[in-house]
Image: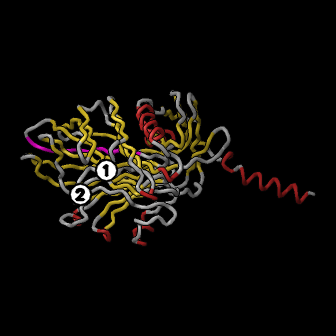
Amino acid sequence: MKRILTLTFALLFVGNLHAFAQILAKIVINNKSTSLRKDAVVEVPWSEIVKLAPTIDTANFIVVQQLNGQEVAHQLEYKGLRTVQNLLVQLTVGADEQVMLQVKKGKPSPYDTKTYARFVPERKDDFAWENNKIAFRMYGKALENTKENAHGIDVWAKRTAKMVINDRYKLDKYHIDHGDGLDYYHVGKTLGAGNIAPYVADSVWYLGNFTAYKVLDNGPLRSTFQLVYPAANANGLAISAVKTITIDAGSQMNKIAHVYTFNNRTEIPVAVGFIFRNEPDKLTLTDPDGVVGYWEPAHGEDGITGVGAILPSKPTSYVKQKKQLLAISTAKNNQPFIYYAGAAWNKAGEITNKEQWFNYLKNYKRDLAAPLTVKVSKK
């Protein structure tokens, strides 16, 4: 009996090590909106943590729920710099709810990788990225002047939380569903699933494919990278661009910050666009406040893809062409034009019809307008 009690106590002690660990800082996250924030990735300024714990070891701390001691997945975000910029945590915060976290000394548990991005030189300079919901790719310079060339964002359908990019490229049969999804989305000479391009003289001007890249952060909760586009002609105007794309775990959307550089003007019109399919009645959402969506027709047994974007402000206009749906806005010289674009696949089983997809886009914009608030304090 004594041995059983001793063993029980030892197990309880080991199981509650987090409870006895030194508290370095307290984080309070508030959701002042009326919507549930499920699996939200929240930014906590690292400088505020360091003020309270200047000797914190970046490899030996944990984040736990104050209420129950449960560990919360976290990531240090560098944004391509040498020093940490943010502590990222992923958690669910209910409507009008407050969640309290503690930063403690300890060895973090291994987390599942939920985002990933990489350059793919073995496939003509693709750049591919994904999270636990969906995957995408953009096309590099090596694909130009080939029959495969395309200018827009490509979608890779997924129905698994696992990362699939490396396996699909290795197998080299990603146009076939082997149980976790496939690439059946067609881009061609369009903006695909929400790419952006100058819209000059009532025409979309494709500036070519990216020639350089840089990975700024790479999982497990957020991946961010940059693509560089050299100067190209748009109706006589030389325009270069740098695109920064961020994908968070649990989201169908990418955050895209696109910076155009040009001379002799302060701004240019731009188009965020989506390729149309050949069906008579196109299921589209063109909200005047800048939410645009398209629910594609079924592609045989491959399923249905929904695509969409959230613009930073009301678009100048919506243009429906034969091949594309375009949302027209204005981008200023050397200033980031920030918008959100993404996709969903009905066979993933979460968003299965146009009503759900259009509501997802509208709710996403609503939540952007009411971000979670973060406060860091000492214990």
What is the CA distance from the residue labelled 1 to the residue labelled 2?
29 Å
Asked if residue 257 lies in the magenta stretch, the reply is: yes
Measured as percent of width and height from the top left, residue 364 is found at 43, 36
Earlier-in-chain disc, 1 versus 2? 2
Q: Give the magenta-colored segment's residue range.
A: 253-263
Q: Nearer the viewer, residue 119 or 190?
A: 190
Q: Which residue is mark 2?
A: 210
Q: Amino acid at mark 1?
A: Asn
Q: Is residue 358 above or below residue 195?
A: above
Q: Nearer the viewer, residue 80 or 334?
A: 334
How many numbered marks appear?
2
The main secondary structure of the magenta stretch is strand
Looking at the image, which residue is at 41% across and 45% down? Answer: 253
Q: In screen coordinates, is 279 left or right of 93?
A: left
Residue assigned mark 1? 278
Q: Mark 1 Cα within 10 Å, few/some/many (few <14, many 20+)? A: few
Kindly identify the residue that appears in the image at 30 percent across and 44 percent down: 257
**The N terminus sits in image quarter:** bottom right
Q: Is residue 218 among the parts visible in the rendering?
A: no
